[in-house]
Image (cartoon, rainbow, N blue to C red):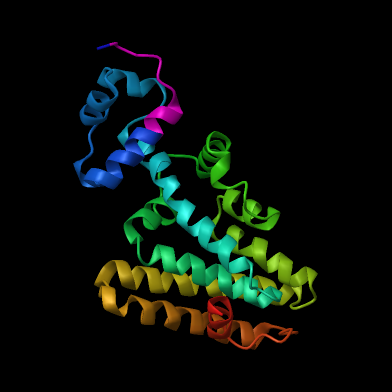
Amino acid sequence: MEYFKGLSRKEYILKTAEMIKRDGIENLSIRKIAKELGCSSASLYRYFSGLDELIYYAELRQLKDYIQSLNKAGLVWKNVWDKYVGVWYCYSMEAFRKPITYNLLFLTKKDIKLKEAIGEFYDMFPEEIQTSSPVFQAMLRNPDFLGRDYEVCKVCMKAGAISEEKAVVLNRMVCFLYMGYFKNLMDKGVKKEELDDYIWKFVGDVERIVFSLAEDLQGYKNYGEVVKRKKR
């Protein structure tokens, strides 16, 4: 066994992501990761402050499904409200099904500096984001939870669909709505067979806020119609 073995941060992240998928986060340890990589446990500390930071970077790879969902849904969006509600639909579809991962990535306070972590991750794995539009890239690289949503709010403002003043309210209300739904799911749980209904209830509430604040709906009716359009 080589003490350091010349491993890179990327190699640690890839191996840890593989082990999380195979064994689960709860079964990870620095010793187990080092054993699979054939190096000393101490070598991990050359690149990461500890196991929590390494797990955080590895779990960022879980966003790949969200990015793919956004790209696929974007093919049938016809106006900015399709996009705004659709982003939340795609996000809730992933977050409500992987609450532990999404809580770790976006809502749990860590010593890790989120802005630098996300930027570095996508520099190491450009293939995870390069297929996305500039708006989605800006959104995904934004470390602030409300800030990510506001990137899409700006698209709505630019299209004349909502004023800046109301966009600020939309941003705040929808993000706090999501946090309430997510906390309820984390605290009480939602049965697997009830998840789709839970997601659509959330999307319906997002739409109620949109309908109350939008100045031009641009023909938008409901996201259920968009999903039907995608299936045709």
Task: Say which quarter of the image contains residue 53.
Answer: top left
**Which region of the structure is painted magenta?**
2-13
Can residue 48 be seen from the camera position used here? no
Up-down: is 175 above or below 8?
below
In the rendered image, which quarter contains the C terminus? bottom right
In the rendered structure, the answer to whether residue 26 lies left or right of residue 117 reads left
Magenta span contains residue 100: no
Evaluate whether residue 108 shows in this view. yes
Vertical placement of residue 107 versus 32, above or below: below
Q: Residue at x 46, y 56 (%)?
A: 65
Tell me what residue is drawn at x 76 percent, y 76 percent: 163
Where is residue 50 drawn, in percent x and y? Answer: 33, 31
Q: Quadrant of the N terminus?
A: top left
The image position of residue 8, as x and y in percent, is 44, 23
- Residue 171: x and y in percent read 61, 70
Residue 117 coordinates in the image, percent (x, y): 51, 39
Q: Taking 28 as reference, is 147 above or below it? A: below
